[in-house]
Amino acid sequence: MQKSENYTKFYIVRHGQTEANEQEIVSGHFDSPLTPVGEKQAKERAETLKHIHFDAIFSSDLVRAKRTAEVIAADRKLAVNTARLIRERCFGDWEGRPTKEVMEESRHMIEWRKTLTEEGKRASKMNYGYESDDDIAWRLMTFLREVAVTYLGQTICVVVHGSIMRAMLMHLGFANYDELPAGSIENTGYCMIESDGVDFFIRETVGVNKREIEN
């Protein structure tokens, strides 16, 4: 293994519970604040990570991620740097609507996607304006590559969203599409990844629930 100074260490954290999560509404770029439970989750995650020295903290520009990052940054005297590039997937015309409603409306598309290859599932789009898993993985990976080079050998916290984390983990080979379905990453679940801006290595996951698939 290469020496640690050749790699940037990332703690990539999902935001706390939001009002949209609680009400089962599709969020995406639709913004939704943390619930009291979400605030508590963020504080608990800050506590579990307090022994980690972060050199910088970044978050999506959406309020739920930014607020979670602010809680983690509170006792560290670090500013939270926001980036549009790492915001949640755009769900197109699903955004702001009840999850059950869009699932029922789109059931034929959902069944069609199950018939696709792994590559086809990640490239598929459910409606006009919907970003595929490939699209959002590319956004997050581009951001991490740039930060890895800038902060080489340092430790960075990045607060993002469930879908974009899931797409990245699939892209890195942690799981396939069916092993990591929507909802697999808990609020404030995280993964620790090391990168030199080219290669990525998943070192730890917490609150990431990979499903066992029987052959």
Image (cartoon, rainbow, N blue to C red):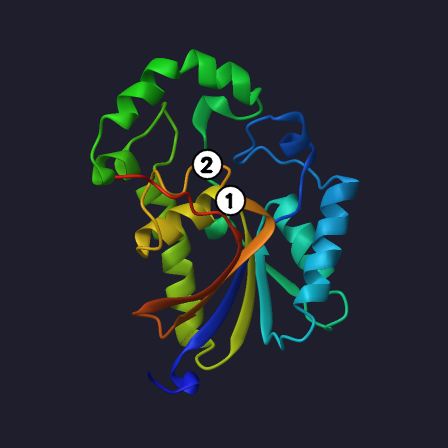
Q: Residues within 10 Å of mark 1 (few under 14, many from 20)?
A: many
Q: Nearer the viewer, residue 170 or 10?
A: 170
Identify the residue at image location x=39%, y=75%.
Answer: 149
Identify the residue at image location x=47%, y=77%.
Answer: 151
The percent position of residue 156, horizontal first and vertical second, equals: 54, 70
Name the residue furthest right: 36
- Mark 1 and mark 2 lie on one chain; the one further toward the N terminus is 1
Disc number lying in front (1 or 2): 2
| Quadrant assignment, res 176 | top left
- In the picture, measured across the screen, residue 116 lies left or right of residue 143, that is left
Per the rendering, the mark at residue 182 is 2
Identify the residue at image location x=38%, y=44%.
Answer: 212
Q: Nearer the viewer, residue 5 or 82?
A: 5
Badge 1 element:
helix
Q: Which residue is mark 1?
A: 162
Name the residue furthest front: 214
Q: Residues within 10 Å of mark 2 (few under 14, many from 20)?
A: few
Q: Does the image show residue 194?
A: yes
Q: Nearer the viewer, residue 199 or 29?
A: 199
Q: Amino acid at mark 2?
A: Ala
The percent position of residue 41, horizontal first and vertical second, equals: 71, 50
Would you place residue 82 above or below residue 48 in this image?
above
The percent position of residue 159, horizontal first and vertical second, equals: 57, 56
Identify the residue at image location x=70%, y=54%.
Answer: 42
| Quadrant assignment, res 180 | top left
- In the picture, measured across the screen, residue 148 lies left or right of residue 12, that is left
Would you place residue 94 above or below residue 69 in this image?
above
CA distance for labels 1 and 2: 8 Å
Q: Nearer the viewer, residue 55 or 4?
A: 4
